[in-house]
Amino acid sequence: RIPETQMRDVDIGQQAQVDTRNGIVKGIVSGISGAAEEGTVTVDVELQGDLPRGARPDLTVDGTITLERLPADTIKMGRPAFGQEGGTITLFKLLARAPAPPVGEAIATKVRIGRQSVNEVEILEGLQPGDQVILSDMTQFDDVDRIRVVN
């Protein structure tokens, strides 16, 4: 079952992996249910190869469907608490910390995000590899440009 909001890019024939908790099995999306039920859509995956020991019908599993492969030099980060694909958001970017954390500062930074997965987003502008940002909802600080961070 996949949230219907995540279904727009899922198509028959895409590669998938199913984690049975006893091993991971490769597969291919072989069917998509026509209607959403309780906010989710059922996707069938035809498993390929040998099943791990302990696999049985109606086993609770986790699956990953490969929608697209991005180039290795794509900048990405964890998915923030807000933001739409193709939009610009403001995140607090951590500045280089002194040798003795836990005290540091973060500055408000405009970031343009691209494609999104369930847990990651592509960065189009505003961040460089290695930059650290706060992904939590920081809207309470919309009126400031800099915050102090204490762990």
Image: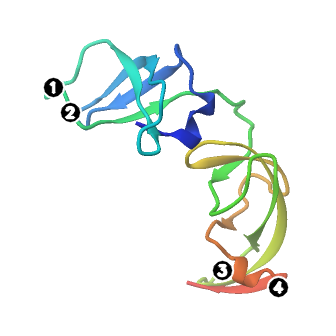
**Dot 2: few (<14), some (14–19), or many (≥20) neighbours within 10 Å?**
few
* Residue 144, label in figure: 4
Label 1 or label 3, whichever comes before in sequence order: 1
Viewer-side label of 1, 3: 1
Q: Secondary structure at mark 2?
A: loop
**Dot 3: few (<14), some (14–19), or many (≥20) neighbours within 10 Å?**
few
Label 1 or label 4, whichever comes before in sequence order: 1
Q: CA distance from mark 1 to mark 3?
A: 53 Å
Label 2 or label 4, whichever comes before in sequence order: 2
Q: Secondary structure at mark 3?
A: loop
Q: CA distance from mark 2 to mark 4?
A: 50 Å
Viewer-side label of 2, 4: 2
Q: Which quadrant of the view contains residue 134? A: bottom right
Going by the numbered disc 4, the residue's amino acid type is Val
Residue at x 79% of width, y 80% of height: 142
For label 2, the residue is 59
Contact flag, marks 2 and 1 (Cβ < 8 Å): yes
Going by the numbered disc 1, the residue's amino acid type is Arg
| Rendered location of residue 6, percent (x, y) | 57, 39
Residue at x 58% of width, y 42% of height: 5
* Residue 56, label in figure: 1
Is 101 above or below relative to 38?
A: below
Q: Secondary structure at mark 1?
A: loop
Task: Give the position of the N terminus as an image quadrant.
Answer: top left
Residue at x 72% of width, y 30% of height: 71
Viewer-side label of 4, 3: 4
Task: Give the position of the C terminus as an image quadrant.
Answer: bottom right
| Rendered location of residue 18, percent (x, y) | 36, 29
For label 3, the residue is 99
Q: Which quadrant of the view contains residue 111? A: bottom right
Q: CA distance from mark 2 to mark 3?
A: 49 Å
